[in-house]
Amino acid sequence: MPNSPKYDLEERTANFGENIIKFAKKIQKNPISAPLITQLVKSGTSVGANYCEADDAESKDDFKHKIGICKKEARETKHWLRMIVVTEATLKEEARILWQEAKELNLIFNSITNKLKK
């Protein structure tokens, strides 16, 4: 299968981070949402950054560690999206789409981690 965007994890995680940034710009800033936005952007963009690090890993253990971070950051992003919806319910549907992508990325990285254990 050629490098289709669905299976190119570097591109997919970069797109995810870009979409998180675009989403974050739509959130009304107030004392409650401001720290949530910061956390969301940090975790959402970290998935791709850590995948790039994993892709250039110096060892199998380094690769496994970086993929583990990708998995954790994707899961954390799901949490922040949930909290954002509490502060701004009008963004629920858009957050749901991003949440689903974070879930799929988490499952992909979980699968990679499990295969490395074998």
Image (tube, rainbow, N blue to C red):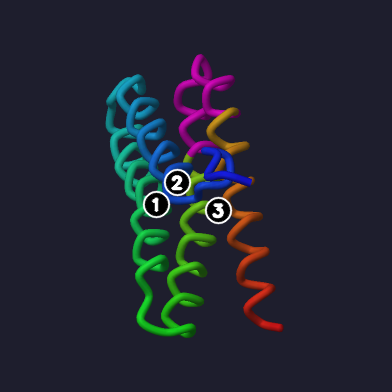
User: Which callout, 3 or 1, points to the residue nearer the camera?
Assistant: 1
Residue 48: numbered disc? 1
Asked whether 72 or 53 is in front, the reply is: 53
- Give how far apart the Cα atoms at labels 2 and 1 are: 4 Å
Q: Which residue: 53% across, 22% down?
A: 94
Q: Are marks 2 and 3 in contact (CB under 8 Å)?
A: no
The residue indicated by pointer 3 is 75
Range shown magenta: 81-96
In primary-sequence order, the first of circles 3 and 1 is 1
Q: Are marks 2 and 1 in contact (CB under 8 Å)?
A: yes
Amino acid of disc 2: Thr
**Is 34 located above or below residue 74 in the figure?**
above
Residue 55, quarter of the rendered image? bottom left
Asked whether 51 or 2 is in front, the reply is: 2
In primary-sequence order, the first of circles 2 and 3 is 2
User: Which callout, 2 or 3, points to the residue nearer the camera?
Assistant: 2
Asked whether 37 or 111 is in front, the reply is: 111
Q: Callout 2: few (<14), some (14-19), or many (20+) C-alpha neighbours within 10 Å?
A: many
> Any magenta on residue 8?
no
In the picture provided, is 42 more to the left or to the right than 66?
Answer: left
Q: Which residue: 45% across, 46% down?
A: 13
The majority secondary structure of the magenta stretch comes to helix
Q: How many marks?
A: 3
- Give how far apart the Cα atoms at labels 3 and 1 are: 13 Å
- The secondary structure type at the circle numbered 2 is helix
Residue 13: numbered disc? 2
Amino acid of disc 1: Gly
**Is 112 located above or below residue 8 in the figure?**
below
